[in-house]
């Protein structure tokens, strides 16, 4: 199986399955001499871990990361950083009913057809549990990036949507509620809606928005390695993501050029930022902001018609512990993938300038 590595200079390779002994990763290309706050790395994992509130999956995993190489006395050595997160609360029997059947809108069918074998326990390698390894690497990347802040938050759940732009929100409120929406009133409305969806045995999607501030001018390349293209690839690699837009996004297509152009100030900044901090594939020093759309979790606690491996029509109902809405736990994943993209380009830019 290919495609387990992300990045060009700062590379992350992940391994492990949802119900295997452990998941983990190897980071190659991390600079030496970086003093790491290991508690901050664990805190990022805590933001993503299951069982943290009443509106997420109740699988209880401590998600404690153990580092095996590449760090000495809390400082990176420049050698590969190997880490493991043990799986402690698997209930593989919850998936015995899909051993020979394919869940609608999951990776079961395509995975089986491509590889001829699949770990049906929680989706195996295609499970969103793999993203915990990305959060570890992203937490390290955040500590490498100088004076760059990455803040993601939930801006939409189903038809509920924050209408305020991020410039009118206090993003310090994001972690003050279990939905991770910086607007307290909307957060409560979203929480109530997610709880109602769970009672119905159903799921709902949503939108995670992200703002990156302090990015220097010059990250990204103008042709195939555009900064926004790599951010899009990173976000679309996250489980359940169905869309990515940055800057004015799809709404920008409704404007005229005279309305959309970002006019310059004398210092090179712009009066508006419909470009989303990226022009010609290169960062321009303004805030980078984007939206990531997540579909409803495919496993629902309702009867659905599907097929088995022999093509027979069967009826199945979801079992196990699943998120009724994935976006609250996706917030740190979005931040981590953004950090991995930025640290890669930052290191690339530093190499070029040398």
Image (cartoon, rainbow, N blue to C red):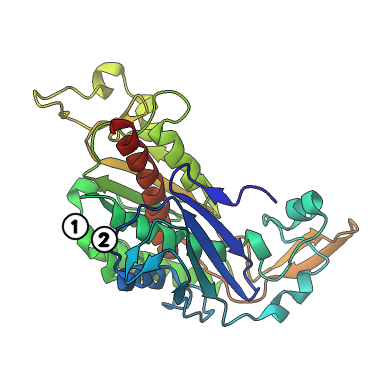
Distance from label 1 to label 2 (Cα)? 6 Å
In the image: residue 185, left or right of residue 139: left
Q: Position of residue 340 (x, y in %)?
A: 41, 50
Closer-to-camera residue (7/262):
7
Residue 262, image x, y percentages: 22, 25
| Sequence-wise first label, 1 or 2 | 1
| Mark 1 nearby-residue class (10 Å; few <14, some 14–19, many ≥20) | few
Q: Is mark 1 on a helix, strand or loop?
A: loop
Taking 280 as reference, is 240 above or below it?
below
- Res. 104 image quadrant: bottom right
Secondary structure beneath dot 2 equals: loop
Mark identifier at residue 182: 2
Q: Name the residue under label 1.
A: 170
- Identify which residue is drawn at 23% across, 58% down: 171
| Along the viewing direction, whichever of 186 and 8 lies nearer the viewer | 8
Quadrant hosting residue 16: bottom right
Q: Residue 131, can we see it? A: no
**Residue placed furthest toward the left:** 266
Q: In this view, does 189 lie to the left or right of 117?
A: left
- Compared to 33, does 340 lie above or below? above
Tell me the residue at 27%/24% (across/down). Answer: 260
Locate residue 318 relative to residue 170 in the image: left or right: right
Q: Quadrant location of the C terminus? A: top left
């Amino acid at each position: 199986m290919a495609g387990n590595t992300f990045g060009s200079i700062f590379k992350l390779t992940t391994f492990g399955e949802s119900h295997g002994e452990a998941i983990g990763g190897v980071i190659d290309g991390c600079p030496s001499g970086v003093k790491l706050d290991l508690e901050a790395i664990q805190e990022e994992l805590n933001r993503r871990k299951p069982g943290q509130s009443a509106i997420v999956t109740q699988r209880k995993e401590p998600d404690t990361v153990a580092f095996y190489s590449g760090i000495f006395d809390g400082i990176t050595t420049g050698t590969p950083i190997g880490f493991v997160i043990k799986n402690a609360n698997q209930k593989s029997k919850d998936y015995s009913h899909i051993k020979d059947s394919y869940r609608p809108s999951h990776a079961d069918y395509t995975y089986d057809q491509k590889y001829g074998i699949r770990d049906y326990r929680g989706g195996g390698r295609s499970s969103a549990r793999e993203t915990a390894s990305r959060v570890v690497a992203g937490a390290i990347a955040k500590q490498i990036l100088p004076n760059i802040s990455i803040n993601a938050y939930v801006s939409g759940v189903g038809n509920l949507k924050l209408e305020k732009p991020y410039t009118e929100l206090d993003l310090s409120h994001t972690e003050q509620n279990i939905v991770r929406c910086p607007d307290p009133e909307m957060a409560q409305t979203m929480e109530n809606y997610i709880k109602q969806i769970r009672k119905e045995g159903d799921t709902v999607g949503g939108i995670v928005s992200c703002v990156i501030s302090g990015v220097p001018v010059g990250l990204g390349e103008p042709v195939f390695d555009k900064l926004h293209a790599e951010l899009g690839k990173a976000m679309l690699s996250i489980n359940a993501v169905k869309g990515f837009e940055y800057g004015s996004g799809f709404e920008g297509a409704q404007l005229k050029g005279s309305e959309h152009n970002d006019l310059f100030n004398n210092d090179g900044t712009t009066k508006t930022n419909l470009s989303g901090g990226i022009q010609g594939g290169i960062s321009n020093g303004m805030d980078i902001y984007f939206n990531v759309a997540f579909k409803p979790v495919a496993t629902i606690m309702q009867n659905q018609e599907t097929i088995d491996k022999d093509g027979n029509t069967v009826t199945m109902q979801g079992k196990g512990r699943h998120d009724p809405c994935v976006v609250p736990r996706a917030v740190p994943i979005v931040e981590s993938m953004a950090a991995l993209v930025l640290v890669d380009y930052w290191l690339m830019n530093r190499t070029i300038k040398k």
